[in-house]
Each structure stands twice: as C-alpha cells, then as structure tokens.
Image (tube, grey):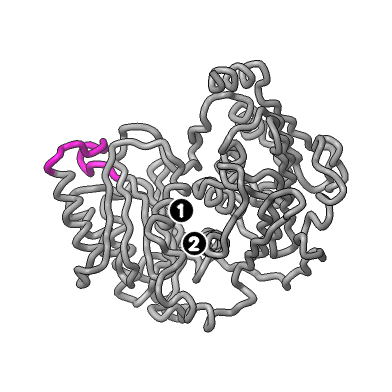
Amino acid sequence: MDDEYTKFVRRMNPPRVLIDNDSCEDATIIQVDSVNKHGILLDVVQVLADVNLVITKAYISSDGVWFMDVFNVIDRDGKKIRDKDIINYIQIRLESNASFVPSMDSVGVTPSEEHTLIELSGTDRTGLLSEVCAVLADLHCNVVNAEIWTHNARAAAVVHVTDDTTGCAIKDPNRLASIKELLCNVLRGNNESKAAKMTLATSGVTNRDRRLHQIMFADRDYERVGRAELRRVEDTGSRPQVTAFDCSQKYYTVITMKAKDRPKLLFDIICTLTDMQYVVFHGMVNTGMTEAYQEFYIRHVDGVPISSEAERERVVQCLEAAIERRASEGLELQLCTDDRVGLLSDITRIFRENSLSIKRAEISTKGGKALDTFYVTDVTGNPVDPKMIDSIRREIGQTILQVKCNATPPPSKSPQGTKMGYLFGNLFKARNFQNLKSIRSYS
C-alpha cells in the first residue's frame, strides 16, 4: 500500500526543472524540485555528468518527502550552457518519471545487443592492458569502446567488443567461454593465488563509470596492503582530505571533503555513498581555482548515522578511493586516427615496448574514427622522459598521437569554517532548509 501511495504521489507531483542562464553571471543554474526517493540525487548528478557538465556549486536538500537541489554548471570550456539540444535533453530526462537510463553518445553503457560487454578486474601490472588487447585481437574481437581504471595495485575495465567480421555482438557460448578463460589467464598472470574476475554479457544498462566504481569497491581496492606506505611517500598536498564526524543536534553524520577539482568529482562521491547505502539529506559544493570543497549530512538508509569508529574509517577510505580512482595520474596522451581492427592492440604494444605504464584509459570510436585517451607514467610511476614520448610519437605518427599539456594554476585558499565543516558552518544550529528557492545569492 505504501509503495502504491508513493507512486501516486510521484505521478501527481512530477519533477520540475528550471534552467536559468540569466541570474548568474558565469554559470547556468539548474534547479530540480521533485518528490524524494532513494537514489534520486545520483540520478540527477549522473544526467549532468553524462553531458560533460562541470558543477561549480551545488545546494542539496532532501530532508522529508521533497527533493530540492540547485546546481551551478558550466561546460568543459568554462562557459554557460547555451546548446539547446543539451538543455532540452536535461529538461526531458530530469522531468521524466522513468529511470535515468543513459542515452547520449557520451554515456557509459549503451543498452543494446550490438556489443558484448566484458568486465575485468585483477592485479595491476605494467603491460596488462596490452596483453588483454592482444588476446582480444587474436580472438577476432574488435574493441568498440572501453574504460580502464587502476588504483592501489588493482585494475578494472569495462570493455565493449564486437566480432571483427560481422560487427555484431558475440553470442556463441563456446566462443564466449574461450574468451573468458584466456582473459582470466592474462589477468592472473604468474600469480595463481591472486584473484582475477571477468564477466560477459550481451547488453547492459548500468552507467559505465558506476560499474567501475562497483567493481573496484567489490575488489576492496580501498584497503589493500601497502596503502599506509604509499601515503607516506605521496605528496600529502595532492591527496584528498575526507573527514566524518557526528552532528548530534540533528542526528546526522557530517562528511567533509577537500580535493583537487576535476570533472565528475561530485558524481564519484554521490555514486559511492549511494552504493554504500547512505542517503544525503543536505549538502553543499563549492569550487575554487583548482580545489573542490564538499560537505554532506548523511544517514544510512535505515535512518541512523554512522555508529562506530570502524564504519567511520571505512566510509572515509571508500570516499578517498572514489576520488583517487579517476584522478588524472600521469601524462595525458590523445590518439585520433581512422579505426581498424587491432589498432588498440598495436598502440598498447608500442607503449609496453617503450616501458610506459597505463594508469587510466578511455577508448571510443565514432564515425569510423578512434578517439582514445591514455594517462601514462614510466614503470616506476614517475613522469615519462619527454624524449621517450617524442620517439613513440614518431613511431605512431606525430599528428595521430598528441600530448595534452595541463597548466596547473596556484592552489586556491580553502573556505574558512568551524568544526561543523568547510561550508555549512553553523547553519543547522539556526534553521533547517525550508525551501531552496530562498537561496539565490550563491553566484
């Protein structure tokens, strides 16, 4: 009965979305009002991430039956959102009562049977991606798109392949079994005791980025041996700072986060909290020149805040891992050329032969073109020698493989705050959010 009543309330109160390009000088404002449900914040943030919008500020409130959020967004070039197709897409997707299933070119997973979906996880090592691509090429599998993450000595990948002759999904059970066996052998390497996992499917609807987080989380990459040692040698200034403490007055756990700003940072945080079965009741996001500051008031789905020090430490570790997995570690290389069967195998082989370690990769094809991005270091994790990159570019093609240079501005100052957090301060001592429409001075 309660479920039917909830559905009735949602039908009578469809989501309302206001997209405003006039009120703020340097950002587009997107305001979402909707009946509250578990996971709705992730749904909204995922839609914004799917069209590559950067969230510069956000105000979140979902305490009770109503969900009211305000987002300041810009595109990757730092400009307001003027594209009518993107505006209409956001409006339609957020105002629909249907599940937020990815449907644009930039979205992670295409729900069709045109591709065979391969999910991989195992111990990371130099040359692993090259070996995986070589096996797929030998098995006549063409990689259409893929994303590969590495973190804390673990690796995960979501790969879409087709038969290199028919261009369709691979469905033959014997062939699928052979692919699975050979890839598991590659993932396992010389260490039979290390866990290696692989799954095969002909279709999927889960967002690709979310699946990568889930795979890494299931592999417990947040607590691997050696993490403490890694922390001591890393530059502490570049690591995310996550804290979790009690807000006893309002029966919340407060999560604060400070990290280097980057695209999809908020998505990664909300995705992890949602999959760990936590609900964000209130939150604020603010970004400086290079850093992002986020604060969330959360409870578990059963309505209680974090109740033990062990749970608190686990949440902090998982959020740190979520931030670090997509961090752009290494030199960014961008490849653009005509697509062909075996191209990815050839490129990754050249990287391996020149002692490059691939930390993260995004593989895509569009209109017969291969559009790939690789983040690489040397085998020890240090920056790559520029002479080595020049040699690789000459071998592959100077115009085909480009080096993307990222100028790093000086670090910005953190917003000042009390123990209650960087952003909210003592707001909850004074009042609850009544209506986010009253918050209009955030620009």
- Residue 79 appears in the picture as rendered: no
Q: Quadrant of the N terminus?
A: top right
Q: Which residue is mark 2?
A: 325
- Residue at image location 81% in from the left, 57% down from the top: 425
Image quadrant assignment for residue 342: bottom left
From what the image shows, is residue 289 above or below residue 440?
below
Q: 132 or 5: nearer the eye?
A: 5
Which amino acid, by three-letter code, is at mark 2? Arg
Compared with 233, 59 (above or below) is above
What SS does tag 2 mark?
Answer: helix
Instruction: Name the residue rendered at 51%, 29% in the picture.
Output: 99
- Give the image location of residue 309, x and y in percent: 57, 64
Residue 365 placed where, x, y %? 40, 46
Q: Nearer the viewer, residue 354 or 236?
A: 236
Q: Which residues are magenta?
A: 161-174
SS majority, magenta: loop
Q: Are marks 1 and 2 in contact (CB under 8 Å)?
A: yes
